[in-house]
Amino acid sequence: MVLQKEVTLRYMLQIQQHWIAGYAKKEKMDAPVNAIFVFKLTTIKMTNHEMIAFAVKGYLGKELTTQEIKEIVLKAFPNFNEGSLLPNDHATGNKCPCPCAGTNTRIFDKIERARYLVR
């Protein structure tokens, strides 16, 4: 159990480092990011869209089932609310989809029921 927590914490740290580097680049920050700035950034929450996109980015061009997508996202973000993990909300869309649905920024293309292509 301790090993699993340690692995999860290391993975979360990698996510935070990746996110911080992207933020620093976006904000055109030349100076190194100091510890206080890092602490403030780690308290900012990622949206469901950002978490799903980050978790599946290693699967670009691959077909995944809804269950596989859930396993991938929950492995990367154990605190993600499984009931909020609806791949079609990030593809063609349902009743209340993500703003990315049906646009070029969508995460998935729906192939058939419960099967999606990662974009």
Image (spheres, helix red, strand yellow):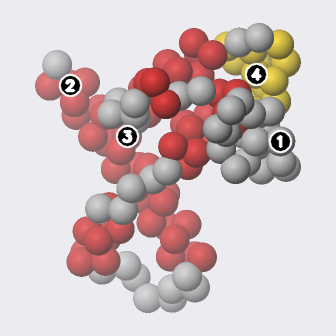
Residue depicted at x 20% and y 25%: 3
- Nearest the viewer among 46 and 7 is 46
Q: Quadrant of the N terminus?
A: top left
Q: Badge 4 local density, few (<14 within 10 Å), some, or many (20+)? A: many
> Of marks 2 and 1, which one's residue comes earlier in the chain?
2
Looking at marks 4 and 2 on the same chain, the residue that comes earlier in the sequence is marked by 2
Q: Are marks 2 and 3 in contact (CB under 8 Å)?
A: no
- The residue carrying mark 1 is 102
At x 33%, y 34%, the residue is 79
Q: Is residue 11 above or below residue 21?
A: above
* Tag 2: amino acid: Leu
| Residue 89 position (above or below residue 42) | above
Provide the secondary structure element on which disc 1 rests. Answer: loop
Q: Which residue is mark 4?
A: 116
Q: Specify the label residue 3 is tagged with.
A: 2
Question: Which badge, 4 or 1, is on the more N-terminal residue?
Answer: 1
User: What amino acid type should be assigned to the residue bearing mark 4?
Assistant: Tyr
Helix, strand or loop under label 4: strand
The type of residue carrying mark 3 is Tyr
Cα distance, mark 4 to mark 3? 25 Å
Q: Nearer the viewer, residue 28 or 99?
A: 99
Q: Earlier in the sequence, mark 4 or mark 3?
A: 3
Cβ atoms at labels 4 and 2 below 8 Å apart: no
Disc ID at residue 11 = 3
Disc 3 packing (10 Å; few <14; some 14–19; many ≥20): some
- Between disc 4 and disc 2, the foreground one is 4
